[in-house]
Image (spheres, rainbow, N blue to C red):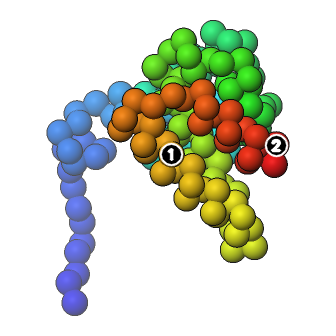
Amino acid sequence: MFKINKVQAHCDIPCKVYDPSVIQYSTLSIVRFIDLINEEMINSYSTPGSILNLLNFAHKNDLNLKQIDLKDFIKKIIVEKKYKKDQFVRDLIFSLIEIYFRNNVSVENIKLLTLQNYFLKKIKNTKIFNLDNEALLMEFEDKVLNG
């Protein structure tokens, strides 16, 4: 219908970015960050800031995020009660639980789907009403990770 012969822009990305090296450097940094983390722990909603915070947490706690799987990482946070010391870890553990369910729920595993609904409601209530994290996480470990 339309015939476009040539398109030009004043920069590589026509969005008021005049130096493409900044974008290239930022993109390569994010790609490098992602190379340091097991794919199970990243979802499509992960922001560069959350990935960086995750890497900082791993560095502080001497964890290799490339070698540990999501289930063992969640267990480690729960068993060592890392969520008690840091607000970031409290938020992180709930995000990791959601990612765990997203990665593992299937039509064949109705029990896990039921547990997903149960725990997501509990997480929501825990956040809204400032309820005890420890009881929720211990129950999650017992029923989902060890169950």
Percent x, y for residue 43?
Answer: 54, 47
Relative to 18, residue 144 above or below: below
Q: Residue at x 48, y 22 (%)?
A: 88
The residue closer to the viewer here, 66 or 32, is: 66
Res 15 quadrant in image: top left
Res 80 quadrant in image: top right
Percent x, y for residue 104?
Answer: 70, 57
Classify mark 2: residues with Cα within 10 Å, few (<14), some (14-19) or many (20+).
few
Identify residue type, mark 2. Answer: Asn
Q: Quadrant of the N terminus?
A: bottom left
Identify residue type, mark 1. Answer: Lys
**What label does residue 146 carry, if any?**
2
Q: Residue furthest bottom?
A: 1
The residue closer to the viewer here, 143 or 37, is: 143
Res 42 quadrant in image: top right
Q: Residue at x 54, y 29 (%)?
A: 133
**What label does residue 122 carry, if any?**
1
Helix or strand or loop: what does disc 2 sit on? Answer: loop
Helix or strand or loop: what does disc 1 sit on? Answer: helix
Residue 9 in the figure: left or right of residue 105: left
Percent x, y for residue 78?
Answer: 68, 26
1 vs 2, front mark = 1
Q: Report if residue 123 is visible in the image.
A: yes
